[in-house]
Image (cartoon, rainbow, N blue to C red):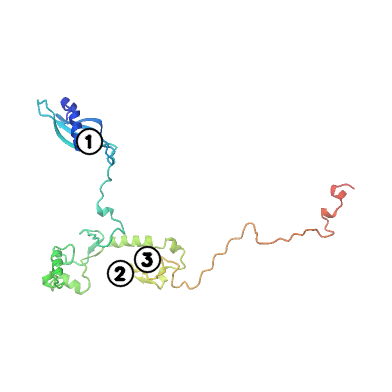
């Protein structure tokens, strides 16, 4: 149980604590005394400011203690601890939460969890994953067999035996252990539609949508009704999955250049020349034809 007040003898051992801190720290990096904290009966921790560059706000913590009924104070431990205003590293975030699209490079491996909600079993009635799956315990033996130039699928390589579900699945073309789940399909569709969908500025200004474009290669499966791959090398979406409602200026049927919109009529028409006579015509009755008296209103 912690004591409410520090032990008197341990609290007075400031010089002992400073000497221990100076021995552990670099020369000249132990600063002013920052107080003491009672950690228990006859256990006190003395705090000293740390002046080392890169450890702003940290403090040297030196713990001293003494035995019961003993007068001699001994050193317990010396550590560097962060203070209230210390500069600390940000909270650790697991790599699975830090990873963003485009972070993977050549040689990087991204393991997939066994319970990834984006995937679901491709076929059932199998007691264990196929040997070529990362979920299988036989994966290491398969890799060793490949290193020894053993033919994949043979009994020596640990491949599926004839009559097993995995072997039958490979024959009929459904040999993938896991496939995209509905959640995985919806996540992918949302990403693709946000990047190349009908609400993008490029699609809003396009002459027509990708649904009628000859450069569109439809996808297979259920996504065929909403997405395809652009094969126009001049399109900004070349090689990308695009929504059928997306479009760009490279549409295959955009053979006629659209007419530019007619600008609005100007408020002040500066393109029209108004004729202006330098002298008025005779008999027009203007002020210039009248005499001086008439101009001033006298007879």
The span from disc 1 to disc 3 (Cα, nearest Å) is: 59 Å
* Vertical side of 46 occupied by 250: above or below: below
Confirm or deny contact between disc 2 and disc 1 (CB under 8 A). no
| Image disc number at residue 60 | 1
In primary-sequence order, the first of circles 2 and 3 is 2
Choose mark 1 or mark 3, whichever is in front: 1
The span from disc 2 to disc 3 (Cα, nearest Å) is: 15 Å
Identify which residue, 214 or 103, lies in the foreground. 103
* Residue lying at 17% horizontally and 25% vertically, measured from the top left: 8
Q: x%, y% of residue 141?
A: 13, 66
Picture quarter containing residue 99?
Answer: bottom left
Dot 3: element: strand
Dot 2: element: helix
The span from disc 2 to disc 1 (Cα, nearest Å) is: 64 Å
Q: x%, y% of residue 21?
A: 20, 35
Picture quarter containing residue 180?
Answer: bottom left
> Mark 3 — residue?
242
> Mark 2 — residue?
221
Q: x%, y% of residue 25?
A: 21, 38
Mark 3 crowd level (few <14, some 14–19, many ≥20, 10 Å Cα): many
* Vertical side of 67 occupied by 79: above or below: below
Choose mark 2 or mark 3, whichever is in front: 3
Dot 1: element: strand
């Amino acid at each position: 149980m912690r004591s409410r007040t520090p032990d008197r003898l341990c609290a007075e051992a400031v010089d002992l604590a400073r000497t221990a801190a100076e021995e552990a720290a670099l020369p000249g990096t132990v600063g002013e005394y920052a107080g003491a904290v009672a950690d228990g009966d006859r256990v006190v921790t003395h705090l000293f400011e740390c002046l080392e560059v890169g450890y702003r706000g940290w403090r040297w913590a030196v713990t001293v203690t003494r035995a019961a009924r003993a007068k001699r104070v001994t050193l317990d431990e010396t550590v560097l601890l962060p203070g209230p205003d210390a500069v600390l590293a940000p909270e650790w975030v697991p790599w699975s939460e830090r990873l963003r699209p485009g972070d993977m490079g050549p040689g990087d491996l991204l393991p997939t969890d066994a319970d990834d909600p984006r995937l679901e079993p491709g076929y059932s009635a199998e007691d264990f994953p196929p040997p070529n799956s990362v979920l299988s315990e036989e994966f290491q033996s398969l890799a060793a067999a490949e290193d020894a130039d053993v033919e994949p699928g043979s009994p020596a390589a640990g491949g599926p035996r004839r009559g097993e579900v995995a072997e039958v699945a490979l024959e009929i073309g459904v040999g993938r252990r896991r496939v995209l789940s509905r959640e995985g399909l919806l996540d992918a569709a949302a990403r693709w539609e946000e990047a190349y969908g009908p609400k993008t500025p490029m699609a809003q200004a396009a002459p027509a949508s990708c649904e009628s474009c000859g450069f569109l290669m439809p996808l297979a499966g259920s996504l065929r009704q909403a997405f395809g791959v652009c094969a126009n090398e001049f399109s900004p979406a070349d090689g990308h999955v695009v929504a059928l409602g997306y479009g760009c200026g490279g549409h295959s049927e955009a053979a006629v250049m659209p007419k530019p919109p007619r600008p609005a009529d100007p408020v002040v028409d500066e393109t029209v020349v108004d004729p202006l006579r330098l002298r008025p015509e005779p008999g027009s009755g203007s002020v210039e034809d009248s005499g001086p008296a008439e101009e001033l209103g006298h007879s």
